[in-house]
């Protein structure tokens, strides 16, 4: 059984859409009888921001798992977009939000993935503000708070594990066990997890922020985290024939989410078809562009470490555009992603607990993750061109919206307003796509 952190780390886009439409001011259906609006003009981005990002930044600080997870995922591109555009108003909204976060820090969720995904916003803000000459906007005490969280997760808080008690030495002990162990009862016991990635990212951001002026004991711990991040990349990343790479091929082959990965056409009562070298699903593989960028920026330009992570990011760009993303074609008018990072397109999460029997992700159904914009952190001409084309073709055709919304979760149906190409959720995603095209 998955624990709550793992379940949240693999949240469906359908659930994300439900949360999005529940935000203040986001749930109004288009007035009947009025023509669908055209794509917002560039000058309308501030109106879109005020409609969709401001409510996220001004609502109460998320102290429960689900809202914290959602905020961490949906605010990353707006954060970088604010600094990329040098928009002081937008940057100040983030500063105000993080000031309130510091005031409420004792009540933040303790679910690993949700907390760390949310705090990654704070560590990224810290680096962006410092490099933009706006370090005065960093809330007092936030670097120390983030360091204490890294230390707690890394070596103090017991780290859960399937089919055994937690590792008392924290995520460090658990990660070392996974890196040093080959004989496991289930392949996914060795999987490096989303929470590990976010801890790497936050530690890298702290190192980038402090550089060499950190306290010696702080520097020692951050270097320890980054040393194991480096080992994960060297040991667990495997090159592909295309010049790209994948992470831990085969590690998920025994996991229930992947047991029908060898089938592309769902049928009633079909038997499992696991794939021996299955890799991460593409919707969760999107975490790697920003994490690699953070790891790269933890080291000085020109250093061997900086160059290594730059090559990894280039390889990920190659993998994405050669194997994962499918551009618009005569068969389908919008960008899509294959379900798996190898380019395989079998079923994913079939019969998943919150989706229901005989349902899940058929081929390309994870494509909604594209709209969150994280592939823009590849920082390539290809990624910017892709997101620009996506933005320029909004509102997306109905068949694209149907695909992007993912499967319906158990016990809920999408309303006509939610399924509209000009729904509030799709307008928000248009904003994310526009901002991603400028990263």
Image (cartoon, rainbow, N blue to C red):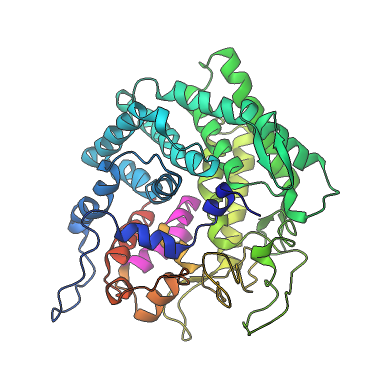
Q: Nearer the viewer, residue 91 or 276?
A: 276
Residue at horizontal 18 percent and vertical 55 percent from the top:
47
Q: Split into 4 quadrants, where in the image is the N terminus?
A: bottom right
Q: Position of residue 251 (x, y in %)?
A: 73, 56
Q: Nearer the viewer, residue 313 or 361?
A: 361
Question: Is residue 311 among the parts visible in the rendering?
Answer: yes
Q: Position of residue 7 (x, y in %)?
A: 56, 54
Judged by its main secondary structure, the magenta piece is helix
Query: Which picture quadrant has residue 263?
Result: bottom right
Residue at horizontal 20 percent and vertical 63 percent from the top:
41
Which residue extends farthest right?
183
Q: Position of residue 165 (x, y in %)?
A: 72, 38
Which residue extends farthest front?
411
| Residue 383, placed above or below residue 268 | above
- Report whether 206 appears left or right of 396: right
Highlighted range, magenta: 373-391
- Report whether 397 appears left or right of 325: left
């Amino acid at each position: 059984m998955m624990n709550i952190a793992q379940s949240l780390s693999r949240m469906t886009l359908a659930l994300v859409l439900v949360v999005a439409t529940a935000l203040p001011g986001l749930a109004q259906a288009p007035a009947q009888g009025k023509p669908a609006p055209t794509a917002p003009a560039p000058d309308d981005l501030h109106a879109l921001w005020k409609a969709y990002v401001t409510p996220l930044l001004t609502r109460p600080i998320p102290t429960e798992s689900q809202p914290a997870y959602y905020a961490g995922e949906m605010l990353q591109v707006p954060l970088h977009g604010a600094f990329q555009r040098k928009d002081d108003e937008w940057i100040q909204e983030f500063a105000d939000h993080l000031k309130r976060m510091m005031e409420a820090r004792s009540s933040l969720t303790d679910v690993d993935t949700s907390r760390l995904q949310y705090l990654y916003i704070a560590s990224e803000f810290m680096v962006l503000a410092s490099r933009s000459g706006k370090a005065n906007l960093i809330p007092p005490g936030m670097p120390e708070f983030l360091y204490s969280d890294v230390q707690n997760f890394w070596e103090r808080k017991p780290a859960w594990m399937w089919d055994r008690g937690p590792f008392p030495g924290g995520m460090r002990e658990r990660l070392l066990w996974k890196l040093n162990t080959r004989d496991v009862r289930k392949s996914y016991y060795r999987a490096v997890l989303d929470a590990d990635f976010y801890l790497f990212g936050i530690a890298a951001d702290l190192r980038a922020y402090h550089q060499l002026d950190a306290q010696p004991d702080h520097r020692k711990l951050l270097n320890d985290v980054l040393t194991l991040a480096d080992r994960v990349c060297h040991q667990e990343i495997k090159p592909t024939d295309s010049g790209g790479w994948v992470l831990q091929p085969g590690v998920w082959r025994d996991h229930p989410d992947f047991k029908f990965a060898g089938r592309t056409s769902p049928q009633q009562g079909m038997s499992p078809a696991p794939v021996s070298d299955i890799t991460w699903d593409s919707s969760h593989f999107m975490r790697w562009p920003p994490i690699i960028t953070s790891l790269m920026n933890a080291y000085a330009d020109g250093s061997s470490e900086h160059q290594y992570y730059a090559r990894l990011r280039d390889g990920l760009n190659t993998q994405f555009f050669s194997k994962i993303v499918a551009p618009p074609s005569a068969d389908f008018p919008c960008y899509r992603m294959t379900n798996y990072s190898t380019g395989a397109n079998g079923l994913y999460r079939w019969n998943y607990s919150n989706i229901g029997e005989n349902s899940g992700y058929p081929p390309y159904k994870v494509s909604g993750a594209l709209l969150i914009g994280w592939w823009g952190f590849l920082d390539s001409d290809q990624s910017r061109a892709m997101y620009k084309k996506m933005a320029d073709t909004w509102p997306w055709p109905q068949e694209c919206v149907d695909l992007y919304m993912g499967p319906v979760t158990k016990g809920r149906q999408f309303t006509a307003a939610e399924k509209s190409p000009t729904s509030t959720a799709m307008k928000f995603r248009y904003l994310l796509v526009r901002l991603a095209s400028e990263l």
